[in-house]
Amino acid sequence: MSAAPPRTLPTTPKSQLSQNANIRKVAVTMPGYQAQFLEFDQKRPLAAIVQDICVSWSLSDPSKFALQTCDSSKASESSKSNYNTYVTERNRQEIQNGTVLTLAPSPAQTAQGIITKLSEGSNKTLSEDKLEGLRQLVRRAPDSTFAVEFINKNGLPIIISIVTDGTFKKEPLALTLKSFVSLMDHGIVSWDILEPDFIKRVADCVNVGSNNLDLVCLQYALEILEAVVLHSSGKQSVVEQSVTSQNIIPHLESINLEVQKNAIALINALFMKADQPKRRKIGESLQSKHMRNTILTHVIRQQNIGTAMAHQLYVLQVLLMNLHEERMKAPVDPHDQVIIREIEELRRIAFEIEGDPNMNAVRRSQSAARDFKKLGFENQTNPAEDFVKVPCGLLALDCMLYFAQNHGENYVKVVLENSTRADEHDCPFVRASMYLTKMICEILRIGEPPDDTGHVYYSMFFSSEKPFEEFFCTIIQLLNKTWREMRATTADFPKVLEVVKEQVTRALNTHSSSFESFRNKVFTLTYSEILKLLENERKIKEEFESQTKPVKELRKKLIPEIQDIVKQQRLNYLVEGSCFPKYSRNGRIKDKFWFWRLAPNHKALHYGDCSESDHPKLEDLPSKLPLVDIQRMVTGKDCPHVGGKQGLRRTNQVGRLAFSIVTEAEEDQICFVAATDYDYHMWCDGLNALLGNEMTSGQVEQDMEMLLSMEIKIRLLDTEGLQIPAEAPRLPRPPDNFNFAYMNFNL
């Protein structure tokens, strides 16, 4: 009787599996019709699927219909509107099992219907059909498929003409502006198509008085003007002539956050695109007391600042700080009389004025060269030469002069404190100021354009008319304090700057609301506190990394290698040898010492008598003990020279450092007492390693941990700054076949 063939599970052909992967089970609805449940095949053309649905419902001309899916991300923007997105060949892959689709008029049909409603009558009258057309347009405009059809059918000029005619107000105008923004956001047409009349009409929505203000119109008018400034060529001047910062500032007090955000965005756009003279004028306006108070009170101090508003405040801060770029990069002419007078003013305030720096009373005549040396100038004959050598020279001079004129008492204190120190501990004020200015420019990224994703801003920079200079005044005093705490010398200058940079960076992360609170915070971050913080962060980072799975696996892999290193180090120590006092079973042999050393081939222990200070060579040791004759090693109270009646009188030190070698004859034991704990651990570990036993001393654990930690750090150097994942990334699914194409590029 033959054996039955083995049973196999039924398998699904690969072609069928591939086909199933392309099928989505969906529902299709349409007002007035019974819903259909069908299998949506991603490989079939959309037109064929729509045709099947129309046939099922007995609808003629399938070309007039299309499928839509609900876009939940846009539906959340308005509770009154149901945003639907047309299904196209580009987005059909987003359809998943359980999706509910709607059969609706095609984009072309919908666009034509809306255009027909908007074209009825003139723009001087507002019919109900035209208003309904605007409402439909607002709902459909965010869909790029519809937008293409609407623009291709010349619907955009109709919207532009409605705005230009200036008849519609309130809701109709708000709907028109909102739909225009949505249509332009798709990037189908250029912003250059706009004429000055349109821009001026939009600007009227911004310049309108509070009595006739419509917040929705204002919100989208500001957004349109911002886009014109940023994305059009040659239309910026029309916006500048039509709306000024004085007209925009009142809108920062609006209760509508979108209006506030768009107002700052428009200011940023005008600021960014302006030439240097206009930028300075805008900057002066923005740093006026009224403007700063408006931003601080109505924008920054609000509790619900979102990411978009934070980004606009960040951009505004960057643009204001970048006003210093010109002075930062300007070349220094050492013969410029203005620079020479400013340097002389620094000397006069520091050394010739008593008390108030604004007083003109001369204390006494001073040697200019000696004063310039105390200030920290290298060239006392022509101090302006110092600013030529270092970047940011003119900006540094501006900051020093501001410090001297506005914080005279602190300026004199810093200069005189440094001038009274010994030369090697002197912190030259001028040199420190120049490098400190360069460091501040790096921290604040002066000269770099705003980052598209940046959102970090500092409230204190909006609290002063001269924020950069005030920032410098605080940090130069911090540097002087840190220099004193570190007891630094001139050679330590780079190290002190690194510590100050760490202090400033950490204090900035607290987002102080004023320079006073920033000063209080940064001055609490002393040099010792910074060291503690860095050490704690290093320990936390190492502890975290040591617990990750990849590091654990690496550690496990390295343990045998490190054990071999530790073992070899013990054996090398025994090869070097040690001197021991001579002991017998009965105790210490007075004034007798012997030297023990392991042979380089690790086959025998050589020994011989010596004096306490001798370190004999291997060939000078007459006796040897082959390792094959050693049975075991014993330690502590198990040693004959420690236990027993004689041993009871031994000190704890002797018992703790004692070990013995037991040879083949059990009664023959060689007794040792190590001089130090380290010597004891090394010999015990080395003998255990030679005998094939485990090294058990506490010193082994310490050495293993130290070497493992060091080796792991070396191995992970290339990952510095990268986040080590807790789990290894998943391997991708293998391809259906491995029939790779081979192309011969040498043909």
Image (spheres, rainbow, N blue to C red):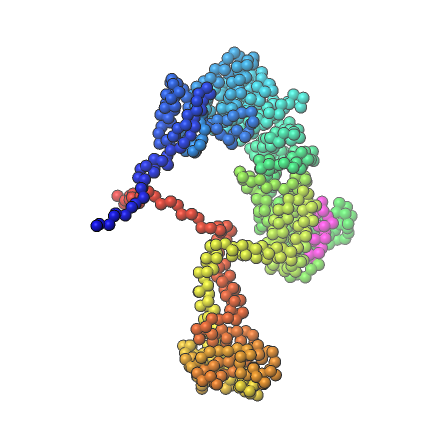
Residue 152 position by quadrant: top left
Question: Can residue 589 be found in the magenta stretch?
Answer: no
Q: Residue at x 53, y 67 (%)?
A: 702
Q: Is residue 238 above or below residue 524?
A: above
Say which of 223 and 134 sits in front. 134
Residue 29 in view of the camera: yes
Q: Is residue 644 above or below residue 254?
A: below
Question: Can residue 411 be found in the magenta stretch?
Answer: yes
Q: Residue at x 51, y 69 (%)?
A: 700
Q: Residue at x 55, y 78 (%)?
A: 636
Residue 664 position by quadrant: bottom left
The image position of residue 370, as x and y in percent, is 69, 56
Which residue reaches farthest left? Answer: 1
The image position of residue 348, as x and y in percent, is 72, 49
Q: Is residue 538 above or below residue 144?
A: below
Q: Is residue 614 above or below residue 294?
A: below
The image position of residue 543, as x and y in percent, is 54, 56
Task: Identify the image quadrant of the C terminus.
Answer: top left
Say which of 452 and 36 sits in front. 36
| Secondary structure character of the magenta stretch overall | helix
In this picture, which residue range is highlighted in magenta? 396-419
The image position of residue 176, as x and y in percent, is 54, 21
Which residue reaches farthest top? Answer: 121
Q: Residue at x 46, y 67 (%)?
A: 563
Say which of 447 and 139 sits in front. 139
Which residue reaches farthest front? Answer: 1
Residue 493 in view of the camera: no
Q: Is residue 667 left or right of residue 262?
A: left
Number of labels in the image equals 0
